[in-house]
Image: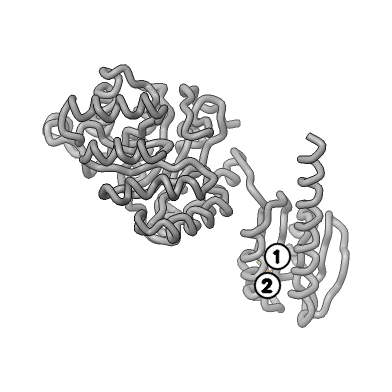
Amino acid sequence: MIVRRKTRQIKIGGVALGGDSPILVQSMTNTDTQDVAATVGQIERLTAAGCEIVRVAVPDTPAAEAIREIQDKIAIPLIADIHFDSRLAVVAMEHGADGIRINPGNLGGEAKIARVVAAAKLHKVPIRVGVNSGSIEKDLLKSYGYPTPDNTDALIESALRNVRLLEKQGFYEMKISIKSADVLTTVQGYRKLSTVTDYPLHLGVTEAGGLIAGTVKSSVALGILLSEGIGDTFRISLTRDPVEEVRVGFELLRSLKIRERGPELISCPTCGRTRIDLFGLAEEVERFVQTMKSPLKVAVMGCPVNGPGEAKQADIGVAGGKGVGIIFKKGEIWKKVKEEELMEVFMTELKKMEEEGQKERNSAKRSE
Ligand code: SF4
């Protein structure tokens, strides 16, 4: 069983993070923040996929000012990602940002940090101190060396130095990230950080890569940390549609039995025993499953050797035979269908189960 490390709790918008709140999945838009329609559209897609906090890049004043309009149209907390410019941080908060991500040390001195902190206190906005291996202060690199799995001191010290800059201003509504592109450095860095602070931790591997490399690197690093109870929120960084980041995030939480969202799809890799077009069926099912909310277990298996055994564990499953598919529901054979009709029959039944699940959820909500 995973024992979660105790952290203090902060609020981002209306959402609690850290402490005993769920581990939150977040993502970042890749639209031009000034393009409100495109940014809102992407945030809506992210929200539908389960994203719980979204970050937008704020490189200039129009982007900071666009936050108000974006904020009015979305349903999840929005964090403004700011580098170097303290004025942008203030404008973003004045325009409704629920949180900001900065490196206080980059803002240009104590007076500027004080201005940002004053705005954060006024607007009740928490700050993420976000340190990356690539942005560590030169003096720390000189003293401690570039971060490696065996020596993450520069990363930790940079984060703590930035934290202290805010604490000096009487500000404590913080979460911390120390990102590296290296998996082992990320793991060791967060392990160490978690022993020296109780601020909530935002996990991530930076510049992780495309869908496959990024998923593997992030899942290895974050999987190790989350399994050790470290981490209160995370982003899976992928060079991809950010919706994929959210999907990978929830699969990661599901695989560790931390949180579940929507259905679980089990499908076999296929082998020489497969006698039906399983890829086509699995793809179609996977596409639909991503839109489902019911926590069903759905199985798509290629053959009657292992297939029915696995599929029987599922709420609905199919095992392929020679030119036929055997559909199981809740462990019982429900129907044997010709291959030509299999896709339609299976998808119709799956959609029906999702609709029934939706009705049950609605009536449970009404009786609450
Ligand atoms: S379920 Fe059947 S087809 Fe799929 S991998 Fe296993 S043995 Fe092969």
Query: Which sits in the foreground, 308 or 178?
Result: 178
Q: Quadrant of residue 22?
A: top right
From where the camera sits, is residue 185 visible?
no
Q: Which mark is residue 300?
A: 1
Quick check: marks 1 and 2 in contact, CB under 8 Å?
A: yes
Q: Quadrant of ligand 1?
A: bottom right
From where the camera sits, is residue 108 visible?
yes
Which residue lies at the image location 32% right of the left edge and 29% below the top edge? 119
Q: Residues within 10 Å of mark 2 (few under 14, many from 20)?
A: some
Secondary structure beneath label 2: helix
Whether residue 297 sits left or right of residue 72 in the image: it is: right
Q: Disc 1 versus disc 2: distance between alpha carbons?
A: 8 Å
Residue 360: percent from the left, percent from the top? 81, 47
Secondary structure beneath label 1: strand
Query: Which sits in the foreground, 155 or 46?
Result: 46
Q: Amino acid at mark 1?
A: Val
Q: Quadrant of residue 140?
A: top left
Whether residue 368 sits left or right of residue 280 in the image: it is: right
Which residue lies at the image location 65% right of the left edge and 70% below the top edge? 284
Q: Which mark is residue 339?
A: none
Disc 2 designates what residue? Answer: 281
Q: Quadrant of the N terminus?
A: top right
Q: Amino acid at mark 2?
A: Leu
Residue 2: percent from the left, percent from the top? 57, 31
Query: Which sits in the foreground, 304 or 172?
Result: 172
Up the image or down, 150 lies above or below 323; here it is above
Count the marks: 2
Query: Which sits in the foreground, 155 or 63?
Result: 63
Residue 291: percent from the left, percent from the top? 64, 59
Q: Nearer the viewer, mark 1 or mark 2?
A: 2
Up the image or down, 306 lies above or below 140; here it is below
